[in-house]
Amino acid sequence: MSVEAWSERCGSGSRWHRVWHTPLRDVVRGRLSGRPDIEPILAAAELPEPLAKLVRTTVRRTRLWRLEKTEVARELAAHFQDGIEAGAPAHELACSFGDPRRVAKLIRRAKTRNRPVAWKATRLVTRSLLAVFALLLVTCVGLTVRLYSGEPTLSRNYLAELNAPVLAVPEEERAWPLYREAFLATGEFPRYDKLDPSDENWAALTAFAERNREAVRLYWAAARKPQLGRVHHAAGGDPESDELSWRHKDKPAEFEPASAGPAEENPPFISVLLPELSPLREGSALLVVDAHVAALAGDAERAYEDIETTFRIAEHVSETPFLISDLVAVAILRRNTDLIGRLLRDRPELFSDEQLVELSHRLAGIRGGGVLRLRLSAERWMFEDLVQRLYSDDGRGDGRLAAESPELLASLSVADWALFDELMKGPAKLLFVPAMSAFVADRREMLRKHDELMRAFEAEAQVPLWQREESAVEREIVQMRASLTERLRYVPIMIMMPSLSRASVIAERGTQERDATLAALACELYRRRTGHWPASLAELAPRYLPAVPLDRFDGQPLRYRMADGYAVIYSVGWDRDDDGGRVPEGAHGNRRARQWQPERVVEGLKAAGSPDLPDGDWVLWPPVD
């Protein structure tokens, strides 16, 4: 059959047919060539239908470009034409041709081998990307299955462990009900700066103390109880936290404390509330004001009771092993030592010798008489409780992130983790959560790393302040935060780890102020019994002091000198230079002098002539206004 006959029969000569079989490059040139149409080629070759069908099948199976298929059809048609012209039967030619699939595969391989380099590179990149995508898809599915196959096991109830010793205390021995009553009996505390007669709001503070004499007596009674005895609750299950946020007289008429909802059997330990800290800290402030008012009136017994009650409040605050509780206890103790120091300066004859001795023993016995250390047990509990909620437990101390863990971490994250929060929203979550479960350290590694950092912090806190360098642990944490991989690998630690080196410095300052107050009490007792101040603190040991307290800034004995007929006790302070008890210039010179930096940093500031380095000493007694 001729090409013209085939075209007339099949309609291949129609314009649309030719457009369909014309390459785009020919169309762009304005030509309707119809070149990729293999039917005219087969028609022109006049092959028997079995051979024509074999050509069509083979060409279709090559999956080549359209022009390449046309070229293959022409070559196959010519091959079969040559066989027929040589006298070979059509069926023998078809049998000798072989399996069309295998032949098409060989033809495709040969043709693609001759394609342009750009196409080969594109194919390689495409295949690589598809392979990577497939690998990621399989990995993501596997990680998703792994993530949802594990569930957390809450093996410890840390809140119950915290409350166990409290519940063992008889009701009549618990101080908290009286503290709560005292706090609710007072109104809003007046604005204050120094809580002593030099405060510009002293008149308002005095009136407040006189108005709340009954609350003061309640604080006295509460402090005599052997234990605080407050049962702690998680957020949402403690109506007292709402009640204590209002002053009794300021409550709206319709106010009612929120009733506690059904308590969780094992709530997150991080959600435990400590609403008692504010009433106890404010109660100690009221007692300090009352002690000054009593001293002005010459009422030594009342002032002494206020001081003793404040010491007991600090002890009650310390019953809960939270870092914040210890910091509040240290703040209360520092407020009390400042009160004692001011009364010694302004009214040295107020207390009897016996009372001064008792105060000395009371001060010396705080926390066993050593450095005021901060405990980290509750911080450890918070992290361990978080881990048991984030991870599954294989029973051998290890486990993997559970399905709910990313949401829990997102609820704890802060501004620094804005990216983390964004990845937890929308479609990104489907990829991010499984990937995160593979990237974040497993349970054993997470606990090991946290314990390592906490132990290092505790070891640094044991080093005397004058021997400390910059915190290696803080430096490591900064480096971990700066590294995206480390930051994500240890994301629970990055969210939960507090700045502990600064907290331990606060405790060291409290220790220094306590020791200086002990020295001041010893100096006053010495003056009363000898008629003059000691020539040095060394004269006080061992009768008035077991030993001369050390300066926490350089490890030497606390400095002492006489000025205008009065004893001055001081530390070399931030600059490590003995300036003879001279306070640095400026409105807050003494406060700046008590700040601490490692000696290497101080020496660098000195060498640079920095104006930020306060030139002077930290005067501990008499108090500097």
Image (cartoon, rainbow, N blue to C red):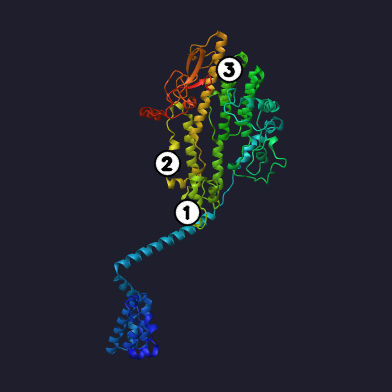
Nearer to the camera, 535 or 200: 200
Please give the residue where the numbered disc 1 appears in the rendered image. Answer: 435
At x 55%, y 44%, the residue is 386
**Measured from the top left, where is residue 101 in percent x and y?**
37, 77
Residue 484 position in % (x across, y down): 43, 47
Tag 2 secondary structure = helix
User: Toward the viewer: 14 or 376?
Assistant: 14
The circle on residue 133 is none
Q: Which residue is mark 2?
A: 479
Vertical arrangement, residue 146 with respect to residue 501, above or below: below
Position of 181 with respect to 459 (left or right) is: right
Mark whose residue sits in front, 1 or 3: 3
Of mark 1 and mark 2, the one earlier in the sequence is: 1
Residue located 55% across and 19% down the image: 518
Task: Give the residue type at disc 1.
Answer: Ala
Residue receiving disc 3: 346
> Looking at the image, is mark 3 or mark 2 earlier in the sequence?
3
Q: Earlier in the sequence, mark 1 or mark 3?
A: 3
Q: Which residue lies most toward the top here?
A: 531
Vertical placement of residue 469 versus 87, above or below: above
Total labels drawn: 3
**Disc 1 to disc 3, how far (Cα)?**
67 Å
| Residue lying at 29% horizontally and 69% vertically, measured from the top left | 116
Say what amino acid the circle numbered 3 marks.
Asp
Q: Nearer the viewer, mark 3 or mark 2?
A: 3
Distance between mark 3 and mark 2 Cα atoms: 50 Å
